[in-house]
Amino acid sequence: MDRGQDNGAQAGRSADTGSTDQVTGRHRAAAPRRLRRTRALLSSGPFRVGSVAALACCLGAVVFVESQTATAPADPAPANLLAERAASAERQPASRATERAPAPTPTATPSSTPSATPTATPTMARTKVARVSKKPSRPTPVAGLTQAQMDNAHTIVQVGVKMDIPRRGLVVAIATAMQESNLYNLASGVLPESLNLPNQGVGYDHDSVGLFQQRPSSGWGTVADLMRPAYAAERFYAALLQIPGWQEMSVTGAAQAVQISAFPDAYAQHEGRAGTVVGALV
């Protein structure tokens, strides 16, 4: 390229540059003018009043819409929807609660106040127990007897009372036992069998055993029977009743008539004590 062309190109660029700067300057100059006009318009009285009124109208519309929404009642259900629900309820089966039988009426509970009968029952029970537990006391020894001797005398008298033996017969029996065994249930040293039975001592008068020293060999009974005080007393009374007129006899005579002893007068010495014992037991 020659210098003429180069200068022409530079001149063209200079012209273009100058025109661009002019246009930009105009725009820059026009912008402040529009801004000033807008500010003037906004600052004018009529525009401000109109803006406030428009804003108030908008706010009032919003408040009205919200109040209507809050206070408006819910839309009632359509008539056909209600009818359909009622028909559906009629078609459903009854609930289990309605099928149950009615609850029974509770009956009156018994009064908590105790009646007279329960109160009296324990008292009667205690009285009955006391009576059952009370055992008859053993007879108190008299006339110098031991408790064992008094117990044997008690047995002799009880048997006689059951047999309706008169008092004199009871005295005869006690006096006889005092002489024969001293009112002890004796076994015999010559009868081993008697030693194995309950006894209160041992005698040696042949085969004589028991309170009345009755001999099995003489037909009074077995050893086992004669070693029982009640049986021995019964056998004595039975023999006494067989003696004619025994009640008019002396104690010694009646006892001897039954026992046939080698010492017939020995029974008389026990008559006084025998009477004391019978008096304490009858």
Image: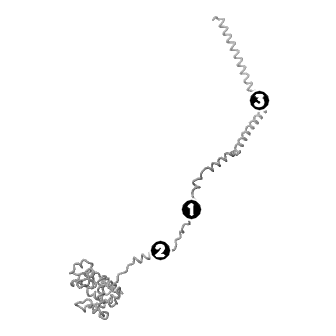
Residue 113 at x, y percent in the picture: 53, 70
Front of the two marks 2 and 3: 2
Q: Seen from this angle, which residue lies furthest right?
A: 46
Disc 2 to disc 3, C-alpha distance: 118 Å
Q: Amino acid at mark 3?
A: Leu
Q: What residue type is disc 2 on? A: Thr
Q: Which mark is residue 41?
A: 3
Q: Position of residue 169 (x, y in %)?
A: 32, 90
- Which residue, given by chain and number where applicable, does mark 1 sit on? 104
In this view of the protein, which residue sits in the foreground, 213 or 98?
98
Q: Is residue 226 left or right of residue 114?
A: left
Q: Nearer the viewer, residue 100 or 177?
A: 100
Mark 1 and mark 2: span between their CA atoms? 35 Å
In this picture, is 273 found above or below 24?
below
Left or right of 123 on screen, residue 15: right
First in residue order: circle 1 vs circle 3: 3
Quadrant of res 198: bottom left
Q: Earlier in the sequence, mark 2 or mark 3?
A: 3
On the image, the x and y values in percent for residue 44 come to 78, 31
Rendered residue at 23%/78% (across/down) = 193
Pointer 2 residue: 121
Q: Is residue 178 above or below residue 7?
A: below
Quick check: 188 left or right of 164?
left
Q: Which quadrant does the C terminus fall into?
A: bottom left
